[in-house]
Image (cartoon, rainbow, N blue to C red):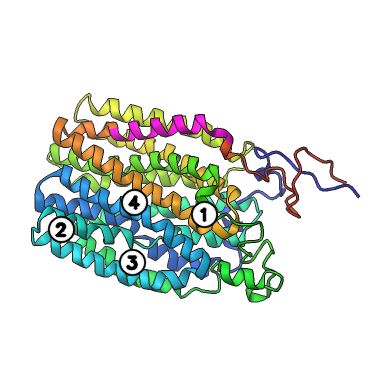
């Protein structure tokens, strides 16, 4: 009998199954709901942290530039430390890392709030911000890692990536609006208090869902020849997988494609951070600070709607090709936003262009997370996902810093140049190193994981 057919990377995700990937099929995955619901609660604070810091520090200092710099410090700390927590989660298990992390984060945020309200010296404020960002729980990478363990080799991975982006973007609709409402309507520190509280409670509930977490590397190595948890083979496609089965690298950064995708999502993060600060500065300059959350919510809603659509499409092109098409569209949308903002204080126009930019963000971000799953072995996957989310946070930090400085020095609307600059540089990196995005096993057989470079006819 002849071997099963194989395809190139561009076609592989779409021809493994005649069934059209869809959210209904995805949500029927065994054990999915046990981590989706607590994961949804636990990830809400991620979208609240930076905007809550911006609003609190701007209230106490009166400077958008300083507020952006403090927020950037939190983002940089998160970007540098979060991948290390992801590596620990791969090695020892998600629950073992998450439980102490959420307690440390609640304590660190409490210290930051106290320091900001007491008008402490700037160096103390920045020093207090570092642990607040460094301990921020990375729930989204952990959820994505659970999907990857459950759906290994399935065309539903693209749908799962889209679903996670929808969920993430929903938090970016709810989180900034909620944080803004709390900070402006209750107390300047209320946003951070809510962020720390939900992080603690949601993180503990999520950590308790141990049955669906990927097999830790230490346990996987000890049992790689035996049955996995819940009676499943550690090398099976549906359950948790042995993380070191293909020889995991010492770090996900050892995979060249990871570094290219980090650059791509850095640009996306600059869109998020630049939009947050620029919209805040713009709405205050027009005397409408209360609509800041609404305008950012419109941007995030566009992102969420596009993510829903991406997850329902059966793509004819592979993720690498899709990324190289979608990213230039994002750059163009950011350019339109930057140009239109200089023409006048037209709230409706900027809101519409914000939604357009959001529509262009989702396909890029979803495709980056889809690609990382194909490039990085299972034993480094949580770390890889965390590098991407950390890079988004770092991009947010850079975007908020640049936008804040521009807003302070050259006018509120100049901050919109930051997303355009960030995505433009990222696009150049993508084009220069696009070959690194090809999966080394791009021609593998879906059923058995064997590699072929050319298509083999089906019996």
- Percent of width and height locating residue 407: 18, 36
Residue occupied by mark 4: 173
Contact between marks 4 and 2 (CB within 8 A): the answer is: no
Mark 4 vs mark 1, CA separation in Å: 33 Å
- From the viewer's perspective, is 63 left or right of 337? left
Mark 3 — residue? Answer: 199
Asked if marks 4 and 1 touch (Cβ < 8 Å), the reply is no
Distance, label 2 to label 3, CA atoms, is 24 Å
Q: Position of residue 381 (x, y in %)?
A: 54, 56
Quickly name the residue at label 1. Answer: 251
Label 2 Cα neighbours within 10 Å, binned few <14 / some 14-19 / many ≥20: few
Q: Which residue is mark 2?
A: 124
Q: Give the class, few, some or many, for how many residues have Cα within 10 Å of label 3's Cα (few <14, many ≥20).
A: many
Q: Which residues are magenta?
A: 418-435
* Near-viewer residue (309 or 74): 74
- Residue at the extreme front of the image, as rendered: 250
Q: Secondary structure at mark 2?
A: helix
| 295 vs 124: above or below | above
Answer whether labels 4 and 3 touch (C-beta < 8 Å): no
The overriding secondary structure of the stretch rendered in magenta is helix
Alpha carbon separation for disc pair 4 and 2:
32 Å
Nearer mark to the viewer, of 4 and 1: 1
Badge 3 element: helix
Give neighbour class at mark 1: few <14, some 14-19, many 20+ (Cα, 10 Å): some
């Amino acid at each position: 009998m002849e071997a099963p057919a194989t395809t190139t990377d561009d076609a592989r995700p779409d021809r493994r199954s005649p069934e059209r990937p869809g959210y209904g099929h995805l949500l029927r995955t065994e054990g999915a709901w046990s981590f989706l619901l607590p994961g949804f609660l636990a990830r809400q604070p991620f979208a609240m942290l930076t905007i809550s810091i911006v609003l609190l520090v701007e209230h106490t200092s009166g400077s958008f530039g300083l507020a952006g710099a403090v927020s950037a410090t939190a983002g940089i700390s998160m970007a540098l430390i979060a991948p290390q927590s992801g590596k620990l989660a791969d090695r020892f298990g998600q629950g073992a890392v998450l439980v102490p992390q959420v307690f440390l984060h609640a304590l660190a945020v409490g210290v930051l709030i106290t320091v900001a309200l007491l008008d402490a010296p700037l160096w103390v404020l920045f020093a207090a911000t570092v642990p607040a960002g460094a301990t921020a729980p990375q729930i989204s990478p952990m959820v994505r890692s659970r999907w990857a363990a459950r759906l290994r080799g399935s065309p539903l991975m693209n749908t799962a990536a889209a679903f996670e982006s929808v969920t993430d973007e929903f938090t970016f609709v709810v989180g900034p609006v909620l944080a803004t409402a709390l900070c402006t309507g209750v107390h300047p520190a209320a946003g951070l208090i809510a962020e720390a509280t939900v992080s603690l409670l949601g993180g503990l509930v999520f950590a308790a869902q141990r049955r669906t977490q990927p097999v830790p590397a230490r346990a996987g190595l000890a049992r790689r020849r035996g049955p996995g948890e819940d009676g499943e083979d550690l090398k099976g496609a549906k359950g948790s997988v042995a993380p070191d089965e293909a020889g995991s690298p010492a770090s996900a950064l050892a995979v060249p494609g990871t570094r290219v995708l980090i650059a791509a999502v850095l640009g996306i993060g600059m869109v998020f951070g630049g939009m947050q600060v620029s919209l805040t500065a713009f709405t205050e300059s027009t005397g409408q600070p209360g609509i800041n959350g609404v305008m950012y919510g419109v941007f995030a809603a566009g992102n969420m709607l596009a993510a829903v659509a991406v997850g329902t499409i059966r793509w004819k092109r592979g993720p690498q090709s899709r990324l190289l098409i979608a990213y230039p569209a994002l750059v163009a949308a950011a350019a339109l936003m930057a140009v239109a903002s200089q023409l006048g204080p037209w709230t409706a126009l900027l809101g519409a262009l914000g939604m357009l930019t959001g529509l262009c963000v989702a396909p890029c971000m979803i495709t980056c997370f889809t690609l990382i799953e194909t490039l990085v072995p299972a034993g480094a996957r949580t770390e890889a996902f965390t590098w991407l989310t950390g890079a988004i946070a770092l991009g947010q930090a850079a975007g908020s810093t640049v936008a804040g400085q521009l807003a302070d020095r050259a006018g509120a609307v100049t901050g919109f140049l930051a997303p355009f600059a960030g995505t433009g540089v990222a696009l150049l990196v993508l084009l220069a190193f696009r070959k690194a995005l090809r999966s080394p096993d791009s021609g593998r057989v879906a059923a058995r994981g064997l590699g072929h470079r050319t298509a083999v006819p089906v019996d």
